[in-house]
Amino acid sequence: MYGAGKKWLMLSAIVTWVATAIGGAVTFDVRTAVDAPPFSDVNAYVQIVMGVLFGFVIALTNRMLSRGSFWVAVSVAAGALLFSVVFFFSYQIYGAQHTCLYATKVRLVTGTQLTEQARKHLTNNPDVSEPCSLVEDFGGRPDKVWLASDLQEKMLKLSVLYMLAFLSTGLSVFSITRTFGAKSNRKVRS
């Protein structure tokens, strides 16, 4: 019976890893332009690399939890859950500051460093102050409003915060499954 329990724990680790790596990359919805595909820049590569690294983290966590006590495992699960909450709210706050909804369907990244063209537009239209209004005035093209390097920096930070929230949630799910699965296996073996 113990061997079957280990197989289920390994299966849960693999399913958690794959679901987290793919889910995080697929559900990230912030774009740099209305017509840009969701994975058009470096963020897709960042998400893939983070997903692969997460597999190594799960393997190391699995090894550590198999050697540690029940309370060490509970601590790892609680810590991962705490990190997932912190990263989730960090992503939400940063996303609220640096994204806007364009045409009620596409979340676009916004920046802080205006292009020359946007500065002229603001000078001619002093009533425009909201980033979303600027994006609308430029036809859903944040790259016409803010510098490309600024937008890339914001996108990278949003992407990393999103993936860290997603990965730490996956790690907490795996740790909880591993912890209570190991505890139930000890009861069956005794």
Image (cartoon, helix red, strand yellow):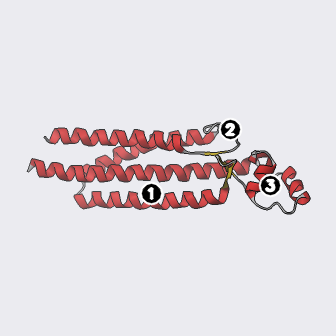
Earlier in the chain: of badge 3 and badge 1, it is 1
Q: Which residue is pictured at 30% across the width and 47% down the height?
A: 62
**Image side of residue 187 versus residue 61, left or right:** left
Tell me the element at label 3. loop
**What amino acid is labelled 2 in the image?**
Ala
Residue 2: image location, x then y, percent: 15, 42
Q: Which residue is pictured at 47% across the width and 50% down the height?
A: 166
Earlier in the chain: of badge 2 and badge 3, it is 2
Q: Which residue is mark 2?
A: 36
Name the disc covering residue 114, or none: 3
Earlier in the chain: of badge 1 and badge 2, it is 2
Snapshot quadrant of residue 3: top left
Q: CA distance from mark 2 to mark 3?
A: 20 Å
Query: Tag 2: Cα neighbours inside 10 Å, few (<14), some, or many (≥20)?
Result: few
| 17 is higher (above) or lower (below) than 92 | above
Residue 146 in sight from this viewpoint:
no
Residue 165: image location, x then y, percent: 48, 53
Between 102 and 165, the one nearer to me in the picture: 102
> Of all residues shown, which one is farthest toward the front?
104
**What amino acid is labelled 1 in the image?**
Ser
- Which mark is nearer the camera, 2 or 3? 2
Q: Which residue is mark 1?
A: 84
Q: CA distance from mark 3 to mark 1?
A: 33 Å
